[in-house]
Image (cartoon, helix red, strand yellow):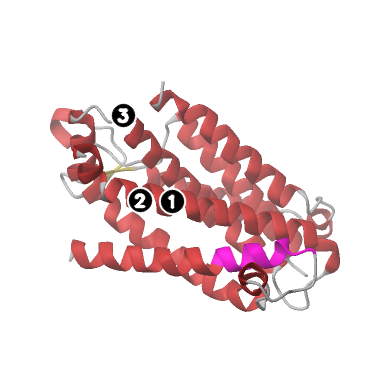
Amino acid sequence: MSRFGQVKIFSILFGIIYTVLFYVNWSPFRYYPAMEKFTRETLPLEEGGPAILWYGWVILGVAISAVISFSIPRKLAEKLSTGLIWIVPAALLIAILIYEKRWFF
Amino acid sequence: MIETMMMVHVLIGVGLLGALTHQAFSVARRKPAGVNFVDRFRSVHSPAFTNTIIVLFVAQTVLGALLYPRYRLDVRPILEDLGLRAANGLFEIKEHFAAVGLGLLPAYWFLWRSPLLPEWTTARRNLTWILAFIVWWDFLVGEYLNNIRGIVAS
């Protein structure tokens, strides 16, 4: 279980970072499927068509979580409660459901 | 090409659903395996599913990501034209759940590594159930959206 502490932090952090990114609706880049183009610019709908931000949320989430989790010393990371591995994601799923209820009402 | 990818996406989804449901039920078992269907369903060697589940989950997410542009261009405008706002909402939740699930896989792999540590039993069981919930949600929403024209027409 040498790297388990850091992996725990990665898994917990990734969900949090991803959720924050989609909540603030910010992505380091966007994909415009109508133009088949990745860009850092935000194009008007008439010009670029609909944009996909999901790829940016996932990639940035992985990058930030990996950097932070592997920067934390192993011994410190091991101290994090194993229970948080499922408590935080469960809370995130509930938060996502609550936030996305805007589509249904 | 898209049709083939869709078919593979569905087939991987079925495999993932089966493997994770088996594993989730096996960790929920609190009594010795009996002889009825549910007990037999539960009494699998659950660690054996772990690597398969991870590979299928990653493959499923990558395929979903490749199919996403087609959904955004062809399917979502139809849903919007038909006023099916809730269907779009279901898809939004599906994509978020898939991402959260993807991030959980490294911890999930560690928890299921042999030998299974007894102090991780609760975390292992609950994380497996969370992943099973995500996979069931994503599969059912995916199938609903695939068939929505027929469902709405009826």
Q: Position of residue B95 (x, y in %)?
A: 42, 46
Gap between marks 3 and 1, in whole Å?
17 Å
Residues marked 3 and 2, same chain: yes
Q: Give neighbour class at mark 3: few <14, some 14-19, many 20+ (Cα, 10 Å).
A: some
Assign the magenta stretch its main secondary structure: helix
In three-dimensional space, the C-alpha distance between marks 3 and 2, rounded to whole angstroms, equals 15 Å
The chain carrying label 2 is B
For residue A50, side relative to residue A89 (left or right): left
Tags 3 and 1 both on a single chain: yes
Q: In this view, does A16 lie above or below A25?
A: below
Q: Is mark 2 on a helix, strand or loop?
A: helix
Residue that label 1 marks: B138
The structure residue drawn at horizontal position 57% and vertical position 40%, both measured from the top left corner, is A93
Q: Which image quadrant for residue B116?
A: bottom right
Secondary-structure class at tag 1:
helix
Kind of residue indicated by mark 1: Asp
Q: Around disc 2, counting alpha carbons within 10 Å, would you say few (fewer than 14), some (14 to 19), or many (20 or more)?
A: some
Whether residue B106 is visible here, answered yes or no, is yes
* Magenta residue check for B27: yes
Mark 1 touches mark 2? (CB < 8 Å): yes
**B22 in magenta:** yes
Q: Mark 2 points at which residue?
A: B142
Magenta-colored span: B20-30
Q: Is mark 3 on a helix, strand or loop?
A: helix
Give residue A2's position: percent from left, percent from top: 77, 70
Query: Which residue, given by chain and number where applicable, does mark 3 sit on?
Result: B85
Please report, as a chain letter, where disc 1 is located: B
The chain containing the residue under callout 3 comes to: B
Name the residue type under label 2: Gly
